[in-house]
Image: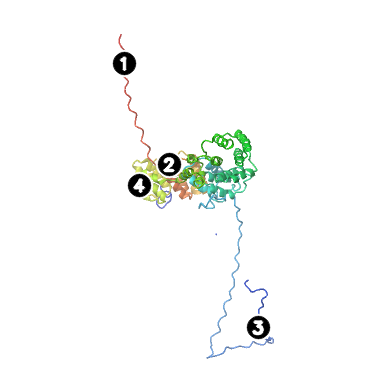
Amino acid sequence: MSALRFGFAPVSLAVFGALAVGGPASAQLALPPLADPAPAGTPAPMVLPPVDGPLSTAPPPAPPPVLTAPPPVAVQAAPLQAPDLFSAEAFNTGLPGDLWRGTSDGLARLVIPQLSQKPLSPAAAAFARRLMSTGAAAPEGAGEDTDLAAARIGAVLALGDAPGARAMIEYTPGLRQNAALAQVAAETDLVLGREEEACAIGDMLNVGKDQPYFRRLRVFCLMRAGDKAGAQLAYDLTAEQAKDDVYKRLMSAAVSGAPAGEASLRNGIEYALSRRLQLEMGPAMANAWAPIPPIVAKDLAAPLSAQAAAATRVAMPVNDTSRASTLDPAIRDAALALADNRLTPDISDRLVSSGQAGGNEAMGGAALYAAAGAPADARVRAVFATFDIGRSTANQGRLLEMDATATGGAKGDAALLALWLAADAGPAGPTVADRARIVRALNRAGFKDDARIYALEGMLELRPPPPPPPPPPPKKPVRRRQPRGN
């Protein structure tokens, strides 16, 4: 692998630039009577037209050309590729159908399950949701992997799109034979208020009914049907298998009438229990599971307080550019340029100049602006090369592989590695140095808009550190008493 380097590109480069006519069958054709045929060998008489003037000596007109049909074009039949489990889509994301061509199926199995298990920053979550929602041919070897298909749909659900997850489930076979897929489908239906459909999924499942989730779903469905004795028995079995104090509190209230306490919106079952118990969901909305607030915000049957809290959560933008007003002017203008997708060399110059004057935040801003594809001249590139934008804390193997696949490999690999690094970093996102590497890789791999949004997220966090606390006041000297003499 060739040596990897990061920096500005010239203005002309993109390193800093982030488908028998006829009558009825009974009709008779009337022909004129035929004359007696002339004896064989008799020349045909010449029939002259009437002459109104002198005879013309011009040759007779040439007969019209005979038109011949072109030879038929040979049609080459090509077999159509059968849809695989990755063909289901949540919506038209604009990403191509060859998104996963050449992508490592092993890497997909490592990364995709993490997207519903680890928290991501808002910009990383938006990119992950777009990527997982795309209908495309699966990585080679993964087209029939139902567990991986379940993880992909589960990621779309966990990242906030229950209707999209339901659309994908409709086109994914194997619901009765795969517990992971059935769980994602049941949770999706519970979030969407389709309790009867969720219970039917549990009833029709052929495998994994003894898993804790489906035992809990069975308790809920028995309670919902009014069979409190059966629900109590099933609940006792569930409590022994997997203890959960929140689920215990809510289900005890639903079955026996015990105090319910506060609402819980951690998953579909707890959301369905909280709604059936008519608990106040507003206070819990800020920490609710991502697919729940968009549904509650549109649910006219929900209490107004819950609708309002859900609407507030949904209205939170991925990147709130109103915060840019508190930034250094050069960083502010760079953030607004990223938001408008208007990257100019003069802002590159201002960032570098500010960084050269000692602004550490501007140095980081220059790195993010460059990685998103902003142009810069030779002087700016030279000055940038002197900057220290901080240390990398990410896994170096993943960084190196991401760099390599972004320039000469499968774009799906580059996207998965970028999301793996983002999942490692958590909801606060990576360091500036690591974020710039991710932005540059996404930009080079063809995810230009996603790269720009991820760079903007980092730019909006570039604030100077708070001033150190004032030193404590000096302590007064303690006067010691002199011992009295005898």
The kind of secondary structure element at disc 1 is loop
Disc 2, SS: helix
| Up/down of 42 relative to 449, above or below | below
| Kind of residue at disc 2 | Val
Q: Sequence order check: which comes first, mark 1 or mark 3?
A: 3
Mark number displayed over residue 350 = 4
Extreme residue toward the top, this view: 486
Locate residue 465, reporting x and y percent: 38, 38
Q: Which mark is residue 481?
A: 1
Q: Which residue is mark 2?
A: 432
- Measured Cα–Cα span from mark 1 to mark 3: 151 Å
Q: Is 429 on the left or on the right of 242, as rendered?
A: left
Mark 1 touches mark 4? (CB < 8 Å): no
Query: Seen in the image, is 449 located left or right of residue 35?
Result: left
| C-alpha separation, residue under disc 4 versus residue under disc 3 | 96 Å
Q: Which mark is residue 32?
A: 3
Crowding at dot 4, Cα within 10 Å, few <14 / some 14-19 / many 20+, comes out as some
Up-down relation of residue 46 to residue 313 (above or below): below
Circle 2 crowding by C-alpha within 10 Å: few under 14, some 14–19, many from 20: many
Q: Residues within 10 Å of mark 3 (few under 14, many from 20)?
A: few
The amino acid sitting under disc 1 is Arg
Position of 346 with respect to 409 (left or right) is left
Q: Which quarter of the image is occupied by the C terminus?
A: top left
Q: CA distance from mark 2 to mark 1?
A: 58 Å
- Mark 4 or mark 2, which is nearer the start of the sequence? 4
Q: Say if mark 2 contacts mark 4, CB within 8 Å.
A: no
